[in-house]
Image (cartoon, helix red, strand yellow):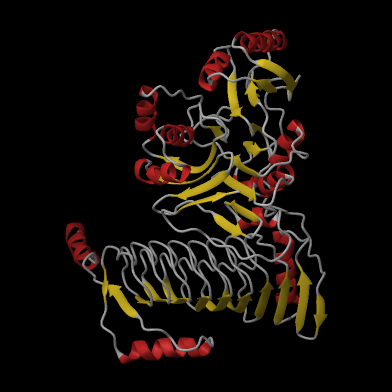
Amino acid sequence: MDAVGERQISYDARGLSEPDAEIPKVSEVDGGRAVFDARDLTTRQINLELRWLLYERGITDVTVKNPGSKHSIGVGILTRCKITYEGSLGYFGCGMIDGPEVHITGRVGWSACENMMSGVVVIDGNAGSLTGAAIRGGDLVVKGRVGARSGIDQKGGTILTLGSAGSMNGFMMQRGRQIICGDVGPGLGDSMYDGIFYIGGKVKSLGVDCVPGEWDDADTEFIERKFRIYDLGSPPEFQKFVCGKKLYNYDNLEPSERKLVL
Amino acid sequence: MCGIAGIIYRDGAQDIGRDMTRMLQSMKHRGPDSTGYALFGPAAHPVVMRYKLADANDPRDFEFTERLQRHRAEIESRLRELGAKIESVEDETDYACRAVLHYHGDLKQLADYIEDVPGTEVLSLGHSLEIVKDLGDAETVSAQYDLGDFTGTHAIGHVRMATESDVDISGAHPYWAYPFADIAVVHNGQLTNYFQWKRRLERSGHRFQSECDSEIIAVYLAEKMGEGMSLEEAMRASMQDLDGVFTYICVTKDALGVAKDEMAAKPLVLYESDNLVALASEEIAIRAIVDHEIDTYDPYEGEVLVWTR
């Protein structure tokens, strides 16, 4: 007869908590380049292999085959290098990176490149929601479409999307630029503090405090340069949107608070 | 958190029990408390009924086995009383059964009379729908109910991280859309107008087996379809009536539909090919059944999509 609580429940299915995982050392190394197949490796093993190649072997160009949409791949890489993922990544792919030049031939799930500091990430397919959340620098190029709330809390850098985007893009954006060639969903730039949107398609609705901006030569130069760098052909016509700064009242509040304190 | 998944094969029956297990097991980290399946077999049975006599967590007192035997016999007696001819009754576990019946009467009356037996809950009732749900991960439940050999055309599944109600079978998904045959729902999210809709639907004569907000969706869709709406129309109506953050998948005997709330707050990844539609909270679940590179995307906010087989 079964007893209550007899069933074993494990929270370890992500393969993230593998304290005993060892570096697989399965890469084929050729000079400064390395290739390895991630099909049968766990997330932890893939990241250990990457770190071993980049930090201990001094490899500067790594190709990861068959990443299989596993989560949290390639996070926290803080060195200048080139990484190619032949396939798709799951959630949190390439998060918290500083410096790498990354090419993903498939798609990426939610929260791609979250908190990216610098470097370049080019995604050939689509990306999920929260793409480029809180990025501070670098270029994130998505050749497909992105989900909702992309560039939420963006603090710098550029997110360039060739396809369409979902709702609430750039929610609470603080700085940086988003170039979206397709249509965008409702609530664009809601509660943004600063930053610029360039939208090529239709805007379903603007969020609170997001307003049309005045186009100048610097905008044209910026967009043409980004399209030239990533070999994207001729840019379409864009509309510019910026922060209306009607909600931007910290400067008024702080002195009054200071008065109260004094 | 919870994870949901759905597959529909357009070119005939496949090993959906095995495939759904692979999808759900790959998302175990989204909810290890319980796992559930709604599977559609290819051959229409006269009537197939899945029911449980007790919950997996019920205390095993001294009379537990005898009590369940009495209740099992009482259910078979009531089935005969209603004019059902019992083709077979299989014990899946010591508390869950699968009965195949010949019955042409009112399914609501049948379900109500069976559920009047203490501790009994009808998990599914229909001609090809079979809902299996229990505590533990997908491999545990699949092995327990021998789902590896289940062939069929479409299925949905759910891995549950219990947040709003207890860890028990009643709180596990999928939910059968009582009293309509062959309709089931899985859900990831929270409904904030749950009590309002529960009271409203109870006044219309519907009953609820759990305290789980997700059950509302199944009963809501059942009521709308009972009023004559198609699955897609009912799902579109739900976007206006249900409040909260949610992604849910609904299946009927020949269709599978998905709906995302207006904020797109809950994930869903979609893959569509000529012979297969697969969707899940995470792409890793789709990869578990498709071994080549695929192109997937996230449906946007407020989207309702329906596929027929």
The residue at the far front in this view is: B104
Q: Is residue A31 left or right of residue A237?
A: right
Q: Which of the pair B128/B120 is nearer the observer?
A: B128
From what the image shows, is residue A99 above or below residue B106?
A: below
From what the image shows, is residue B272 above or below residue B255?
A: below
Residue A247 in which image quadrant: bottom left
| Residue at (61% x, 10% y) in the render | B78
| Residue at (60% x, 74% y) in the render | A78
Q: Where's residue A136, x and y in %?
A: 46, 73
| Residue at (61% x, 43% y) in the render | B156
Q: Where's residue A55, x and y in %?
A: 71, 76
Whether residue A256 is visible: yes
Q: Is residue A79 left or right of residue A185?
A: right
Residue A166 in which image quadrant: bottom left
Q: Where's residue A49, x and y in %?
A: 75, 68
Whether residue B169 is visible: no
| Residue at (53% x, 75% y) in the render | A143
From what the image shows, is residue B186 above or below residue A134?
A: above
